Amino acid sequence: MLNAFFCRQVLCARDGNMSTNNKRRGRSGSRSSVTGVPALVKAPTAMSAALASLFECTVCFDFILPPILQCASGHLVCSSCRPKLSCCPSCRRRLGYIRNLAMEKVARYIMFPCKHSNTGCTATLVYTEKAEHEEACKFRKYSCPCPEAPCKWQGGLDQVMPHLTMSHKSIETLQGEKIVFVATDINLPGTVDWVMMQSCFNRHFMLVLGKQEEFDGHQQFFAKVLLIGTRKEAENFAYRLELKGHHRPLIWEAISRSIDEKDDEALLNSDCLVFDTSLAQQFADNGNLRINVTISIALSKNRHIHASKK
Ligand SMILES: [Zn+2]
Ligand SMILES: [Zn+2]
Ligand SMILES: [Zn+2]
Ligand SMILES: [Zn+2]
């Protein structure tokens, strides 16, 4: 067992600007064959691009994908902009909820460019495959996952770990499926985060223990494990956190999350280990909290067992 600690107020003054070799494995932008897609999609690229441009939203410039809404004059509005609008951005007429079924059918025949085309992706996709491709697209930019650090860095998934190593040097990395994460001085006042990296299964995981102050002055701890990877990849790993007390342990098991998720997403969904200060005191030793972390491959069977325990 390895033992390590660090107390955060992680400082990251610099944005790492790393050069990388882009030899990441995983799905590339090239499109797989689509069953049931008519031959028209194989239309020349210029034609396909011209057709796709007819689906551009005049408000957000994203593509208008089914369900496609229009105003009474026929101007299209995308469904994410529609709730924010009371009148048509083109003709100012009042907007109802009129579907344009013909355009929805046409959309099925069009190859839409990936939304990361401005950063180099050349993939074009049928709309039903667009979101899935974009989630895993290798040209996609991720934000620095370091919690609450004033770091504006963004980069590809394969650049996240080099960035953390270069610009957040205080974050320690431990190797192995089972490690001990020691958070020191858990009684520090205010909002504090303790962060550590764990490498196993040829992947990197970020372990985060946070302390937050609630409105009523009540303090809460939360702990979670985030994969440096996509949301889909994160579903392949499970983690177990164990706090060993004098009499009994506190155990939390869950599927890992992705660094792609917003900061509070796990906390809002209560999908992380949450405990209060008095419980933390029961497990702390001289103000230090030891958390045994085990990462494993999530079998769908395990997921079922875990779910049925709740
Ligand atoms: Zn829009
Ligand atoms: Zn209109
Ligand atoms: Zn792409
Ligand atoms: Zn950073």
Image (cartoon, grey):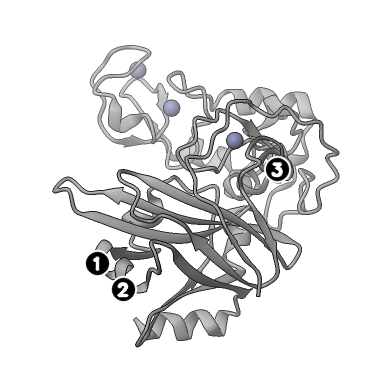
Number of marks in the rendered image? 3
Mark 1 crowdedness (10 Å alpha carbons): few <14, some 14-19, many ≥20: few
Q: Quadrant of the C terminus?
A: bottom left
User: Disc number at residue 282?
Assistant: 2
Q: CA distance from mark 1 to mark 2?
A: 7 Å
Residue pointed to by mark 3:
165
Residue pointed to by mark 1:
278
Q: Please tell me whether mark 1 sits on a helix, a strand or a loop.
A: helix
What residue sits 49% from the left and 40% below the top?
104
Mark 3 crowdedness (10 Å alpha carbons): few <14, some 14-19, many ≥20: some
Q: In which of the image's four quarters is ligand 2 placed?
A: top left
Picture coordinates of residue 246 (x, y %)? 37, 84
Q: Please tell me whether mark 3 sits on a helix, a strand or a loop.
A: helix
Mark 2 crowdedness (10 Å alpha carbons): few <14, some 14-19, many ≥20: some
Give the quadrant of residue 39.
top right
Q: Is residue 132 above or below residue 155?
A: below
For marks 1 and 3 on the same chain, the one whose residue lies earlier in the sequence = 3
Q: CA distance from mark 2 to mark 3?
A: 34 Å
Amino acid type of the residue that numbered disc 1 sits on in the rendered structure: Ser
For marks 2 and 3 on the same chain, the one whose residue lies earlier in the sequence = 3
In the image, 137: left or right of 227?
Answer: right
Amino acid type of the residue that numbered disc 2 sits on in the rendered structure: Gln
In the image, 97: left or right of 243?
Answer: left
What residue sits 19% from the left and 53% below the top?
218
Q: CA distance from mark 1 to mark 3?
A: 34 Å
